[in-house]
Amino acid sequence: PPPKTPPPPADLGIRNWPGKKVAALVECIDGWQEVQRMTSSLQRWHNLRDFSCIDECTRMETYLRIVKQNWATTGGSEAFIARCGTAGVRWTSEPHTVLRRASLQLPKVYLERVVTEVGASSGVMPKAERLELLRGAARLTAQVQQFAGGLDRDCSIWLKRAQNLQAQLESGRR
């Protein structure tokens, strides 16, 4: 009998795969691309001076909610990892670790903006408004800390500055 020739490298035998395996591979690839897109967006996040502090915080919280939802469907769940396994793809946690680290950009940027604006507007902005900005920054930071599993050094420094500023405002020293 003639020797069997292997399929061409581009084919990889995917045409012979069962439909579930192909669907799992496509889902795995889509999940990886979504994680990469979100990570890139988070890493490039910058102050949006066109928006007020409150509006920027709302935008950040909304984006973080989207990231968390996508996290659950693209690798944060055991079911997703199992479906990738059926496609023969070993899913590592590295893309999601990078995504978690990138999410730390949100509170870092926002805390810096809030501390700067609240510190500079002691006579202009009402005290209640300044306290609300600081509380919003603390809420956002707590959400990201829970998702990311901790804070990096820069976030911790800005959070401490915000807490000191809030303590000064509440004690009446500012």
Image (spheres, helix red, strand yellow):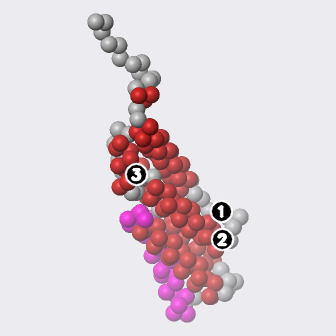
Looking at the picture, which amino acid does disc 3 mark? Phe
Q: Quadrant of residue 160?
A: bottom left
Q: Is residue 24 left or right of residue 55?
A: left
Q: Mark 1: which secondary structure?
A: loop
Gap in Å between the C-alphas at discs 2 and 3?
Answer: 34 Å
Disc 1 from disc 2: Cα separation: 9 Å
- Identity of the residue drawn at 50% across and 76% down: 138
Q: Secondary structure at mark 2?
A: helix
Q: Note whether 139 is above or below 15 in the view shown.
A: below
Other residues around mark 3 within 10 Å, as few (<14) / some (14–19) / many (≥20): some
Asked whether the residues under the numbered discs 1 and 2 touch, taking CB atoms below 8 Å apart as contact, a structural biologist would say no
Q: What is the count of numbered marks?
A: 3
Q: Nearest the camera: 42 or 129?
A: 42
Rendered image: mark on residue 55: 2
Q: Earlier in the sequence, mark 1 or mark 2?
A: 1
Question: Identity of the amino acid at label 2?
Answer: Asp
Kindly state the secondary structure of the residue where label 3 is placed.
helix
Query: Can residue 153 be seen?
Result: no
Of residues 44 and 33, the one drawn nearer to the viewer in this rendering: 33
Q: Position of residue 129 (x, y in %)?
A: 64, 84
Residue 106's x, y, as percent? 53, 63
Alpha carbon separation for disc pair 3 and 1:
34 Å
Left or right: 169 as drawn, with respect to 9 = right
Tell me, yes or no, if residue 133 can be seen here. Answer: yes
Which mark is in front, 3 or 1? 3
Q: Residue at x 42, y 49 (%)?
A: 95
Q: Is residue 33 above or below residue 62?
A: above
Q: Are marks 2 and 3 in contact (CB under 8 Å)?
A: no
Query: Which span is picked out in magenta?
Result: 147-172
39 inside magenta stretch: no
The numbered mark at residue 48 is 1
Q: Which mark is residue 80?
A: 3
